[in-house]
Image (cartoon, rainbow, N blue to C red):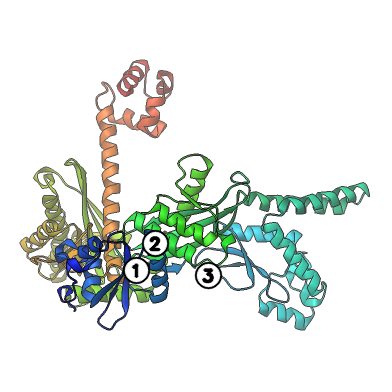
Amino acid sequence: MPDPSTYRPRTSEIPTEPGVYRFRDPHGRVIYVGKAKNLRQRLTSYFQHPRHLTPKTHTMVTTAGSVEWTVVGSEQESLQLEYTWIKEFSPRFNIMFRDDKTYPYLAVTMSEQYPRAMVMRGDRRKGTKYFGPFYPARAVRETLDLLLRVFPVRSCTPGVFKRAERSDRPCLLGYIGKCSAPCVGRISPKDHRDLAQQLCDFMAGDGKAAISELQRRMKAAAAEMDYESAARIRDDIKALQRVFERNVVVLDESVDADVFGIEQDDLEAAVQVFHVRGGRIKGQRGWVMEKVEDVSDTGLLQQLLEQVYGDLDDPDRIGAQVWVPWLPEDVEATEAFISGRRGRRVRLTVPQRGPKHELLETVHQNAKQALNLHKVRRAGDVTVRSAGLQQIQDALDLPEPPLRMEGYDNSHVSGTNVVGSMVVFEDGLPKKKDYRRFTVKGEAARDDTSSMYDVISRRFQHYLDELSAEDDLASGEIAAEDAAVSEQRFSYPPSLVVVDGGPPQVAAAQQALTDLGITDVSVVGLAKRLEEVWVPGEEFPVILPRNSEGMFLLQRLRDESHRFAITFHRERRGRGMTESVLDSVPGLGPAKRKALLKHFGSVKRMRQADVEQLQSVKGVGPTLAQAVHAALAP
C-alpha cells in the first residue's frame, strides 16, 4: 500500500489559485478528480494524520501513488475541466451514477414497421418515444388500456404478432377493438403508423385537440341519429379525459423547469428528475448513485448537476429553471455551467411554498421510493448477500461466515423509559419472529454501557437457561412438559453480535458475555459517525469499504435495531404519558380508563371531547366526566 508521505508535494510548491487536481495510482491510472478555489488549501487537507481523515479519503490517499494539478483562470473553468476529466477517466473514487432501471414508462416503438405501445423499464432505446412519469406502476398500465380504446395500436410481443400473421387470425385485443390488427392486414402500415403518431401527440400534450375532434364527431353522429356511434365516441372521450387528467397542468403554462429530488443514506443516493414543460410533467429520469467519495450535500448536488447537464447534447432538453432541494456549493458557477450548455440563462432555485414546493416534495417521494426499492432488491439477491457475509468473515477473521447475526441498540430520553432491542438477521435477511424487546430498569438504566450490559446479559442468560433445560430433558431429569421446549426462544446463539456504538458499548457487551462464560460468540460495534467497525480490545477500528456488500449488510442490521428500539421506546413513552395524565383523575379506575381509551381511541381525541361526549361512555357519570375533562384541559 503506498505511503502518502512518499508522494506528498511541498506545501510551498502548491499554488493558491483555483484549479483541478488528479490523484493517480502507482500504475498511472486516475482514481480521483477534484476542483478547488485554493489548490494549496484543498490538497494539504488530504495529507493530514490518518485519524483525521474519513475512511474513504484515507483509502483513496493510500491507494494513490501521485498527485498533479492544473491551474485555471476562474472557478467556472475549473468546473468545466473537472467535468471533462471525470467523463474521460471515470475515476473510481468519484461519485458513480447508475441508471435507475426500476421506473416504468409508456413507450411507443416508432422505429418498427408496426409501432408497438407498451410498458417499458430500463435503458432508453433509440427510435422509441417515452412518456411519464407514472406512479404507481399500475397507473401506466391503466393509462395504456384507456388509450387503446381510442388509438388501437399494436401492443403485442413480436412472438404473438408473428403467430397471428401465420394463422391469419388476430389476438383477443383485435377482436374486442383494442388493436387495429395490422398482423392480418386490417390496417395498412402507413395508417397504423399515423395512429401511433396520434397516440404520441396526445401523450406529448396535444390532448385538447384530440378530445375536441372526438366531441365534434360525437355531435355529428347524434345529429344523424346514429346514437350507437355517438355513445361509443362519448366513452372514448371519457377515456381520454381520464388519461389527460393524469398529466394535468400542475403549474402556470409559462413554467419550464427541471425538478430534482434526492434521497440518500451513507452509501447511496437515489435521484429523480421531473421535466416540466408548459406547466406539464413531460418526462422523468432516475439514477441510483454510489457515494464512493465523502462529500457534503451541497457538493453532491453540484457534482450531480454537472454530470446530468454535461451529458445532454440537446439544449432544448434543459429547462429555463432548475428546482433543487438545496443549493449547490457554488451557485453562480453551476448556473453558468448549465446556462452554457443550454445557450440561454438558467436559474437555480429552492421552492419554499405553494404548488412548486408541493411538486418538489412529490419528486422527493419518488426518490425515496426508488432508494427503498433498490435496497430491497439488493438485499434479496442471494449472491450479493453471500458476498457480504464473506466480506464480514474476512474482515473480522471469523472462523465461518456469520449466518446468524444479532443487532442490539438502546433508546431513551434523558435516562427515562430506557429500552433495548434485539434484531436477528439469518443468511443476510431479517428474521422478525426472533426480534425481542427489553425494558431496562434500576441501576442498569443509568447510562448506555450499563443498559447494553443488562440487555446482552439477559439475552444470553436466557440462552444458557434454555440450553440447561434441553440437557435436563435429554438426561430424563425433567419431563418434556416442564421443559417447555416449544416455548424456548433464545436457544439458538448467533455467530456475531453487532451493537450500535463504539468502544464503550463493545466493551460492555463483551464483558457481559465473559461474565456468563460465553466465549464462542464474536462481538463488534458499528459507530455511526465514520461507520467504523470496532472489535473488543483493539486500539484501531476495522475499516470496510463504504460501498462494500459487507458494510451494507452491517448497516442494515444496525439501522434495523435502531428502528426497532425507537419504535418500542415511543410506545412506552406514549403509554407512560397516558397513564400519568389519567391516573391523577379521582374515581377513574383501570376499567373505566380502558373504556374511555377504547371509545375515543387516544388521549388526544379525549381532550377534544366535551363533558357530554365523555358521559356517553358506559360507566362515566357527570361528576367523573367533569373531572376527566378538567384533568385533560390544556
Q: Residue furthest right?
A: 224
Mark 2 neighbour density, 10 Å: few (under 14) some (14–19) many (20 or more): some
The residue located at (26%, 50%) in the rendering is: 565
Circle number at residue 94: 1
Can residue 93 be seen at all in this image of the molecule? no
- First in residue order: circle 3 vs circle 1: 1
Picture residue at 74% right of the left edge, 79% below the top: 164
Which residue lies under the disc numbered 3?
A: 122
The correct choice, above or below, for 427 with respect to 150 in the image is below
Q: Nearer the viewer, residue 80 or 15?
A: 15
Q: Is residue 224 above or below residue 316?
A: above
Front tag of 3 and 1: 1
From mark 2 to mark 3, how far is it between C-alphas? 23 Å
| Crowd band around label 1 with a 10 angstrom C-alpha radius: few (<14), some (14–19), many (20+) | some
Vertical order, 243 against 120 (above or below): above
Give, as a three-letter code, the residue at label 1.
Answer: Asn
User: Looking at the image, is mark 1 or mark 2 earlier in the sequence?
Assistant: 1
The percent coordinates of residue 387 (x first, y second) are: 31, 76
The residue that label 2 is drawn on is 303
Instruction: Using residue 466 as the reference point, say whether residue 133 is left or right of it.
Output: right
Q: Residues within 10 Å of mark 3 (few under 14, many from 20)?
A: few
Q: CA distance from mark 1 to mark 2?
A: 9 Å
Secondary structure under the numbered disc 1 in the rendered image: loop
CA distance separating discs 3 and 1:
24 Å
Assess whether mark 2 and mark 1 are in contact (beta carbons under 8 angstroms). yes
Amino acid type of the residue that numbered disc 2 sits on in the rendered structure: Gln
